[in-house]
Amino acid sequence: MTKYFGTYGIRGKLDMFTPEFALRMSSAFGEHIKGGKVLLGRDARLSGEMLEHAVIAGLLSSGCKVTNLGMVPLPTLEFEIKKLSAAGGVMITASHNPPEWNGLKFVDKNGIGVSREEGEGIERIFESGKCRKAEWNNLKKVEDYPTALEEHMDALRKTIERRHILKESPRVVLDCGNGVASLIAPKLFKEFGCRVTTLNAQLDGSFPGRNSEPTPQNLQELMKAVVALKADMGIAWDGDADRVIFIDEKGGYIYGDKSFALSVDIALRQRKGPVVTTVATSNAVVDVANERGGSIEYVKVGGPYLSRRAKELNAVIAGEEAGGVIWPEVHLGKDGFITSLRILERMCKDGRPFSSLIAEIPSYYNSKTKLECPADRKQAVLKKFRERVRGEGRINCMDGVRIDFDDSWVILRASGTENLMRIFAEARSQKKADELLRKYKRMVEQLI
């Protein structure tokens, strides 16, 4: 059981996530990959520059050569790993967490995030303190690499048929959340002929415009702006821009499972094959995949699990319900820019309103909640829950406990990054989903 690693990397507030901690953990990562070229990037958080120096020191001390990309989205770093034949990468980010948090996401030589299980080896090195130390005359220099953003954008340009978007010239509202999406999205969408209005496109690590997670509550201004401007679509990214959420032309919030299902439809029209998704993803994705001749492969929740299985299966696409989608032909990380451009391209190609495209996705209704739970109680709660629900439906314990019924399901998972238990329920009606959630929420509260 790891002490620090979650589903993808490590996150914490500065009382835990000190420069000393970042230095030692980065040194342990350098030892874990046995040196070599390591790419470094960071998001816009206020503590990022401080931690950047610590991470560089840790990597250099373990004999690594550091190529510093500077402030970039996570997908940019993951894309550059393969392009630059790096041994690994480190992204300083806390993703969608509040501004007082920061973190480290470690990436392997394939551009795949280091999972919780792989992180155990890094933690053992960290705890032992037995990292090799580079000799003074063998310390590598830090190389700045200022062209990463442009190279990533160039790869995006090549994967989209620009003519459809240029012809329609859609009006889009882009909410960059004061994060690193600001470095790519406004420029790229204007290049593609969109009439662009931006919200929160100024880099500011205190996230003054909205909280970093693109939830319905946090995107109220975007929803209003889309309606007021009579825009065709609203698009919002999280703090490191690997996840993306859409707003339709009516101001409606489109949950990530629906945009992923639409992405699956787009991808499977081009090539048939496996679709990788998590045990917490909507059956709408399954329905679309089956209709388009794809096959579903389930994995644990978390980007690294999606990426690794996508590589193993040569998957057509991979993704999750939270708005993260992997397009393996570009790179093996979740990329909110490819997803948004592919969906925009599809809308313009069809010449229909965005809400019309979404309406074709099979309708399921979700209900979600989270309950505080001490870290040392999570596994006991899951075990007791599994015993309590035995016989109620088809049980899947790949990641937490999922119970499948004929036309609905519910899952209980332990958060990989916070002291929380998460409960998702899905059904063919909102009433049924809410009923399922209430029933199992009461059960979990008793167990906690």
Image: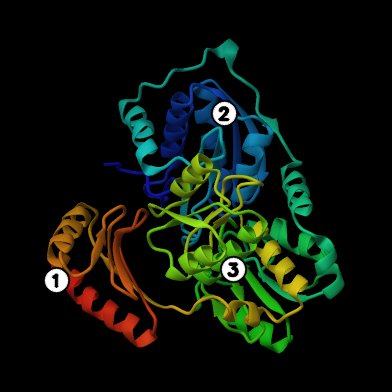
Residue 291 picture location, percent across and down: 54, 67
Under mark 3, the amino acid is Leu
What label sits on residue 262 in the rendered view? Answer: 3
Q: What residue is at 37 percent from the left and 59 percent from the top? A: 279
Which is nearer the eye, 348 or 216? Answer: 348
Which is nearer the eye, 390 or 208? Answer: 390
Which quadrant of the rendered structure holds the N terminus?
Answer: top left
Mark 2–mark 3 contact, CB under 8 Å?
A: no
Q: Which of label 3 and label 1 is nearer to you?
A: 3
Per the image, label 1 sits on a secondary structure element best described as helix
What label sits on residue 201 in the rendered view? Answer: none
Under mark 1, the amino acid is Gln
Q: What residue is at 72 percent from the left and 36 percent from the top? A: 145
Label 1 to label 2: alpha-carbon separation: 47 Å
Q: What residue is at 64 percent from the left and 35 percent from the top? A: 82
Residue 32 picture location, percent across and down: 44, 26
Label 3 to label 1: alpha-carbon separation: 38 Å
User: In the drawing, does residue 97 fall left or right of residue 349?
Assistant: left
Which quadrant of the rendered structure holds the C terminus?
Answer: bottom left
What label sits on residue 87 in the rendered view? Answer: 2
Q: Earlier in the sequence, mark 3 or mark 1?
A: 3
What label sits on residue 446 in the rendered view? Answer: 1
Q: Earlier in the sequence, mark 1 or mark 2?
A: 2
User: In the drawing, does residue 112 fall left or right of residue 298?
Assistant: right
Under mark 2, the amino acid is Ala
Q: What residue is at 43 percent from the left and 36 percent from the top? A: 20
Quarter residue 163 falls in: bottom right
Q: Earlier in the sequence, mark 2 or mark 3?
A: 2
